């Protein structure tokens, strides 16, 4: 997704459907509806969401009998990467430090969690060499 296509932000309904698709790998509208908690939206609402996701090239569709089977064209990680990059660039003026400080302050990261984060960062630095 990076560099090739501009990041596409998903609506709440689109993200709910995508989370189901990412978990299942592929699904029909009925299978997606089965996984949505009550109150369930109408079948046509989910169908419209899937059609929009298809037009955005976020999912692909293949005919199976009378139903379309939808599958993700991007991974959850690709979406999150693009979303976080856009968030960093638009809300934090491109500053990773400010983005991390925001979460550190808002989420009240414990000393143990901070040590774990630093250890991961140091491990990743060594692997880049």
Image (cartoon, rainbow, N blue to C red):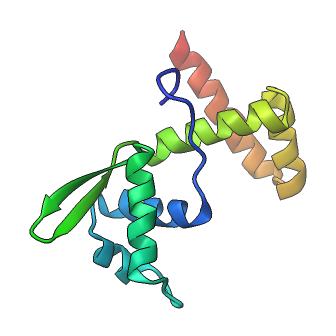
Which residue shows up at 35% across the image and 82% down it? 34
Q: Position of residue 95 (x, y in %)?
A: 82, 27
Residue extending furthest toward the top: 129
Identified at 77% across, 44% down, the residue is 114
Residue 81 drawn above or below residue 127: below
Q: Nearer the viewer, residue 80 or 65?
A: 65
Residue shown at 39% from the left, 58% from the top: 51
- Of 57 and 16, which appears nearest the observer? 57
Relative to 44, residue 102 above or below: above
In percent of width and height, residue 129 lies at 54, 9
Question: At x 45% / y 45%, what residue is drawn?
Answer: 56
Residue 90 pos. (x, y %)? 79, 34
Q: Residue furthest right?
A: 105
Q: Is residue 43 above or below residue 26?
A: below
Relative to 101, is 87 on the left or the right?
Answer: left
Residue 24 figure quarter? bottom left
């Amino acid at each position: 997704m990076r560099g090739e296509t501009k990041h596409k932000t998903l609506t709440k309904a689109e993200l709910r459907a995508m989370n189901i698709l990412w978990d299942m790998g592929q699904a029909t509208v009925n299978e997606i509806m089965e996984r949505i908690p009550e109150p369930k939206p109408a079948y046509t609402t989910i169908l419209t969401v899937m059609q929009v996701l298809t037009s955005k090239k976020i999912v692909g569709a293949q005919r199976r009998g009378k139903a379309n089977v939808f599958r993700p064209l991007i991974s959850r990680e690709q979406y999150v990467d693009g979303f976080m990059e856009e968030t960093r660039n638009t809300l934090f003026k491109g500053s990773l430090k400010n983005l991390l400080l925001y979460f550190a302050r808002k989420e009240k990261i414990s000393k143990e969690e901070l040590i774990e984060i630093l250890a991961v960062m140091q491990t990743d630095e060594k692997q880049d060499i």
